[in-house]
Amino acid sequence: MMSGLRITYRGVEPTGAIDEYVRRRAERLTRRGPTVSSCRVVVDAPHRHKRRGRHYVVHVEVSTPVGRLVVDHSPGDARAVEDLYAAIDAAFDHAVRRLDEEVERLGRSERYPRAFS
């Protein structure tokens, strides 16, 4: 279990189910790439739209020994953001892609240090 996980809620009532879901997604994130030392997740519901309902924005900040990676996932008016769990999934999927890109970039720079300096 990740010890450095912080979950912050803004405009959303915290529940045990959401906490557990975010913890499981964060655990999967730790299996990727460099050692993830901490993860900060902000679950935000900025405002309720009159006709379109509530939209969610999820921010994920991952700290590794190499540096910090920040993912701000708010895809605009897409229907997926009306579901909190879909917004969490999209943010963590984006964080995984970014971590994979960083690992690949670091691997290339270690193999060919002069080419990427």
Image (spheres, rainbow, N blue to C red):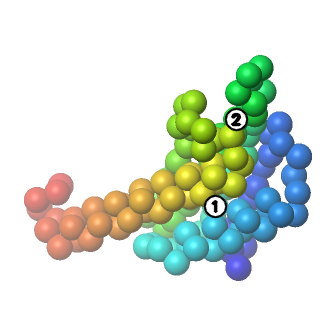
Sequence-first disc among 1 and 2: 1
Front position in the image: 17 or 103: 17
Residue at 74% of width from left, 22% of height from top? 51
Horizontal and vertical percent position of residue 27:
63, 74
Q: Which residue is mark 2?
A: 55
**99 or 106, which is in the foreground?**
99
Q: Which mark is residue 39?
A: 1
Q: Residue furthest top?
A: 50
Indicate left or right for 112 with 95 as reference.
left
* Residue 54 visible in rendering: yes
Instruction: Report x, y in % for residue 9.
Output: 80, 46
Examine the image and state in which quarter residue 117 appears. bottom left
What's under tag 2, amino acid-wise? His
Residue 73 vertical placement versus 35 (above, below): above
Q: Is residue 98 left or right of residue 80?
A: left
On-image quarter of the N terminus: bottom right
